[in-house]
Image (tube, coloured by chain):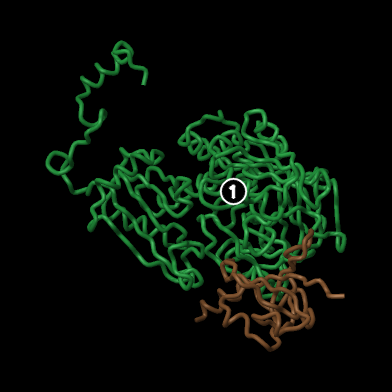
Chain colours: A green, B brown
């Protein structure tokens, strides 16, 4: 059964030992962020902070929603100890069957409604997540809703937003993000403000889908329904026609201004460094805030892996890469970006491997945006979900000269947050991508050129393997 | 009675570029007064100086680099007036300008 809201998920995590309530008063100014960050780095539980300095009882913060594969499995209603490969397979299976959302007349997110001048962002306990961040980030693990005015397409995205002042938030949806595209193609040329809603504390799968890369024109709500195996319930905003998850904890309604901007950033980001500096951000003027009684503000203390962004977000991204490359003719079997790859490094298994496949992969990954900067390509006998196997293949099968394919990425396509890029490269969105070919060249003969793999499966006859496996328990072995 | 000094914070691409001393400049500062409104942004016309002694009736200005690294020595700021909440501009204006080249 899917979780109907974040609260039900939190209650389940408490029973499984995956969430701890902190009842000591904590400060929204860096303390909560520091606690959340340290717990992430120690793969600790999710945290529900029940007493926040400067805020009345009832206002709470939840940190670390999907920072472990255990919590992702629970969110998907899988056994908590499901293997990573199983989580990916189940996500992939459900993702094939979109389920349209249903629109309801009312929802818990409307228990409190503040309109106009009454809508003051300071009433919400937005944290200053890291020392030196440019502001209090109210949107870190949240979803942003906007709509293409000329079609049915409603876009969800996960973009950071900070409190600029009582009635403005500023954020960094990138220029080439889907929100950026809708804003610059449909609203700015007409000098019209764009309606937007920032949804905080949605049920965990709904939030996760917002971070996924679906194609332009695809409404993420359909895929949240797919993963939940039940439609998402949506309710209309108070000040626009946008639809938002009805059981969300907090909804901030506003409009993106086409001709005024405010400073945004810097913010310690998902690659594990604060790479991007202050910018003139996408600026949203608030028109309403609606929230549940005793609202829970969901946040992520982004940083070095693991955290929700490095654990959960790559599931959809890896599957999207696999499907995208297959559509472009690359013979991809599996794709996986492990948490410590922070959406910069991806492992891809192929059949066959070699130069042609490597070039097809690089062509595919540099077509629109090129967020990935390192690809490790392996043969089908290497399990991409086993980092040890991938590292072994990289160590012995990647030729230091012939096996490395590097390309520059044209301006406008690279990632602005990649730490190894110079500040100038990050500002111009210039960069590079490298593929390490850890496959046997397709022209190599299996008799003369390809060394037999010195493993149980690779080097023993079928007869001896069968004998050993049949007698395994009799040898006294339990491994 | 001596007025209690307020504290503000500013982010600059470089000291030379962002904080010319001794003349009126327009900058966005964050108010560091404790409480819920801490870190609120204001666009102000102000004069700044490395030395509080050379800027009477000034407040404290904490200076951070573009990526948020705190410079060790605080500056001084005298705010002449607040000039607005936001500034004219297009979202992603800096990126668009660079792309035009």
x%, y% of residue A93? 51, 37
Does the rendering let one see residue A103?
no
Label 1 neighbour load within 10 Å: few <14, some 14-19, many 20+: many
**Residue B78 picture quarter:** bottom right
Name above or below for residue A319 compared with residue B83: above
What residue did someone put label 1 on? A37
x%, y% of residue A324? 44, 52
Q: Residue at x 78, y 44 (%)?
A: A104
Left or right relative to A198: residue A16: left
Name above or below for residue A208 compared with residue B76: above
Q: Residue at x 55, y 66 (%)?
A: A276
Left or right relative to A415: residue A292: right
Does the rendering let one see residue A106?
yes
Q: Which quadrant is the N terminus of chain A positioned in?
A: top right
Q: Residue at x 62, y 30 (%)?
A: A17
x%, y% of residue A52? 76, 48
**Residue A385 picture quarter:** top left
Q: Chain of mark 1?
A: A
Q: Identify the secondary structure beneath mark 1.
A: helix
């Amino acid at each position: 059964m899917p979780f109907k809201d974040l609260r039900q998920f939190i209650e389940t995590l408490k029973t499984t030992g995956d969430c701890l309530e902190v009842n000591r008063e904590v400060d929204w100014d860096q303390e909560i962020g520091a606690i959340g960050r340290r717990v992430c780095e120690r793969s600790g539980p999710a945290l529900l902070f029940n007493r926040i300095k400067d805020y009345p009882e009832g206002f709470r913060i939840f940190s670390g929603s999907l920072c472990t594969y255990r919590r992702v499995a629970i969110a998907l209603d899988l056994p908590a100890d499901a293997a990573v490969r199983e989580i990916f397979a189940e996500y992939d299976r459900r993702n094939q069957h979109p389920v349209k959302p249903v629109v309801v007349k009312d929802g818990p997110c409307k228990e409190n409604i503040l309109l106009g001048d009454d809508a003051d962002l300071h009433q919400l306990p937005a944290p200053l997540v890291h020392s030196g961040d440019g502001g209090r980030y109210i949107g870190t693990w949240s979803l942003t809703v906007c709509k293409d005015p000329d079609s049915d397409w409603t876009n969800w995205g996960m973009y950071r937003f900070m409190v600029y002042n009582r009635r403005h938030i500023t954020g960094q949806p990138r220029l080439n993000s889907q929100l950026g595209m809708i804003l610059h193609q449909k609203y700015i040329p007409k000098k019209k403000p764009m309606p937007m809603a920032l949804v905080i504390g949605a049920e965990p799968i709904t939030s996760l889908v917002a971070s996924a890369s679906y194609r332009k024109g695809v409404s993420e709500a359909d895929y949240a329904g797919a993963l939940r195996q039940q439609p998402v319930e949506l309710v209309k905003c108070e000040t626009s026609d946008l639809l938002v998850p009805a059981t969300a904890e907090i909804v901030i309604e506003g409009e993106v201004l086409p001709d005024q901007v405010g400073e945004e950033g810097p913010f310690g980001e998902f690659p594990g460094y604060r790479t991007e500096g202050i910018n003139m951000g996408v600026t949203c003027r608030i028109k309403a805030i609606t929230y549940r009684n005793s609202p829970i503000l969901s946040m992520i203390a982004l940083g070095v892996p693991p955290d929700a962004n490095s654990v959960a977000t790559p599931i959809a991204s890896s599957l999207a890469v696999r499907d995208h490359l297959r559509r472009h003719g690359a013979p991809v079997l599996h794709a996986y970006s492990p948490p410590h790859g922070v959406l910069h490094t991806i492992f891809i298994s192929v059949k066959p491997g070699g130069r042609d496949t490597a070039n097809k992969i690089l062509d595919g990954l540099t077509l629109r945006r090129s967020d990935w900067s390192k690809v490790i390509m392996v043969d089908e006998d290497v399990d991409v979900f086993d980092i040890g196997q991938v590292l072994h293949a990289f160590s012995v099968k990647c030729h230091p000269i012939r096996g490395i394919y590097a390309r520059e990425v044209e301006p406008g396509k690279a990632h602005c947050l990649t730490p190894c890029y110079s500040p100038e490269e990050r500002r111009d969105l210039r960069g590079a991508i490298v593929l390490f070919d850890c496959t046997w060249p397709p022209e190599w003969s299996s008799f003369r050129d390809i060394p037999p793999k010195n493993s149980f499966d690779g080097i023993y006859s079928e007869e001896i393997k069968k004998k050993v496996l049949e007698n395994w328990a009799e040898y006294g072995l339990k491994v | 009675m001596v007025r209690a000094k307020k504290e503000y914070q500013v982010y600059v691409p470089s000291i030379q570029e962002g904080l010319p001393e001794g003349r009126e400049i327009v900058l966005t500062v964050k108010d560091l007064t404790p409480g819920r409104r801490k870190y609120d942004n204001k666009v102000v016309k102000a004069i700044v100086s490395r030395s509080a002694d050379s800027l009477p009736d000034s407040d404290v200005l904490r200076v951070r680099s573009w990526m948020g690294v705190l410079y060790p020595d605080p500056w001084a700021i005298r705010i002449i007036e607040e000039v607005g909440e936001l500034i004219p501009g297009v979202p992603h204006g800096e990126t668009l300008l660079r792309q035009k080249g």
